[in-house]
Amino acid sequence: EFSLKTKRGHIINGHVPVKVKEGESPVKANGKLIIIDGGFCKAYHKKTGIAGYTLISNSRGLRLLEHQSCANIKESLKANQDIESVSCTLELQNYHSSTADTDLGEEIQCQINDIYHLMLAYQNGLIPEQS
């Protein structure tokens, strides 16, 4: 339904509290669905048992940070203190992804191919020169 590329696609669902203290995992559907939330809001800490998740995506893969609750977030930020996080690598590729590996990259490559074929048609006289 989401037109995922089955090998690499994911559905990321945000702003949904994950009840870690009850054993719930943020990774579902064999790793295709990842639930994250910005659970820094103290009101959710009792429900979830943590302070939320951050998903990090880069050219090598996906990493999920699970943020631990801290006594006072405002004071921690003011004092530039670290908020403890547990890191979990979800996917690690053996190569660096590039724009060519994205949907937009595929569209750009199609445009390049179209321009190339137009150039060949012009060079072979199939498209006349216009004045």
Image: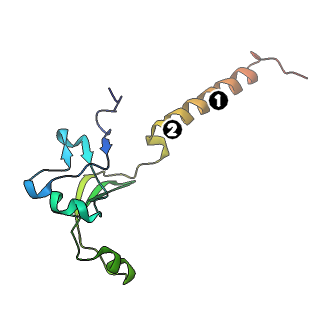
Along the viewing direction, whichever of 113 and 25 lies nearer the viewer: 25
Along the viewing direction, whichever of 36 and 17 lies nearer the viewer: 17
Three-letter amino acid code at disc 1? Answer: Tyr
Q: Which mark is residue 104?
A: 2
* Direction front: furthest residue: 43
Three-letter amino acid code at disc 2? Answer: Leu
Marks 2, 1: nearer the viewer: 2
Local secondary structure at mark 2: helix
Position of 128 relative to 55 (above/below): above
* Residue 26 on image: x %, y %: 20, 50
* Direction right: furthest residue: 131
**Residue 31 image-quadrant placement:** top left
CA–CA distance in space, label 2 to label 1: 18 Å
Q: Would you name the residue on which mark 1 appears?
A: 116
Position of 65 relative to 74 (above/below): above
Identify the mark nearer the N-term, 2 or 1. Answer: 2
Along the viewing direction, whichever of 25 and 5 lies nearer the viewer: 25
Position of 11 relative to 98 (above/below): above
Q: Quadrant of the N terminus?
A: top left
Q: Which mark is residue 10?
A: none
Is disc 2 in contact with disc 1, using a CB cutoff of under 8 Å?
no
* Residue 104 on image: x %, y %: 51, 38
Q: Which residue does the image show at 61% across and 33% down from the upper left?
A: 112
* Direction bottom: furthest residue: 79
Report whether 69 appears left or right of 128.
left
Report whether 47 appears left or right of 111.
left
Q: Quadrant of the C terminus?
A: top right
